[in-house]
Amino acid sequence: MSTMRLRRLKADYDKICTMFSGKSPIRVKEARGTPPEKYQIEFLVTSLQQDPMTHALRSHNCLSPRSRSRRRTRVWRRNAG
């Protein structure tokens, strides 16, 4: 892997750590590689859920201590060349 790519990946990782630290509703759950090329990211978001009986939609608020909606995705940085 080129030195330039390693620097870019390291800079990306540093920025991600800074942006999503603290009380952010976006969390990095896993980072693979040194520096990381693959991430698993969790989003704590307000979403809609459908009641299975009535089919009515209701809000599902991630900020409520009694209910959190977690969505996860995987992201990876591919070599552009």
Image (spheres, grey):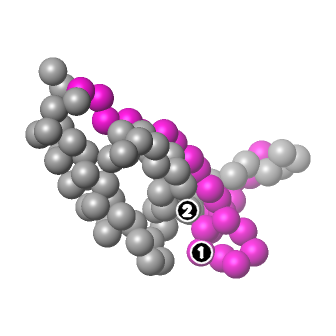
Kindly report the distance in space between the C-alpha atoms of the residues bearing marks 2 and 1. 8 Å
Q: Along the horizontal axis of the image, is 40 left or right of 64? A: left
Secondary structure found at label 2:
strand
Q: Which residue is mark 2?
A: 44
Q: Nearer the viewer, residue 13 or 68?
A: 13
Query: Could you tell me which residue is drawn at 41 percent across and 72 percent down?
Result: 21
Residues at discs 2 and 1 in contact (Cβ within 8 Å) = yes
Query: Could you tell me which residue is drawn at 21 percent across and 42 percent down?
Result: 6
Q: Which mark is residue 63?
A: 1
Q: Nearer the viewer, residue 44 or 19?
A: 19
Packing grade of label 2 (10 A; few <14, some 14-19, many >=20) is some
Residue 42 coordinates in the image, percent (x, y):
53, 54
Q: Residue 16's quadrant in the figure?
A: bottom left
Read off the magenta span: 55-79
Which quadrant does the C terminus fall into? top left
Reply above or below: 39 against 23.
above
Query: Could you tell me which residue is drawn at 77 percent across and 46 percent down?
Result: 55
Residue 8 coordinates in the image, percent (x, y):
18, 46
Secondary structure found at label 1:
loop
Q: Nearer the viewer, residue 2 or 69?
A: 2
Query: Could you tell me which residue is drawn at 58 percent across and 50 percent down?
Result: 71
Q: Along the horizontal axis of the image, is 51 left or right of 48? A: right
Q: Which mark is residue 75?
A: none
The residue sitting at the top extreme is: 81
Tell me the kind of residue under disc 2. Leu
Q: Earlier in the sequence, mark 2 or mark 1?
A: 2
Tell me the kind of residue under disc 1. Leu
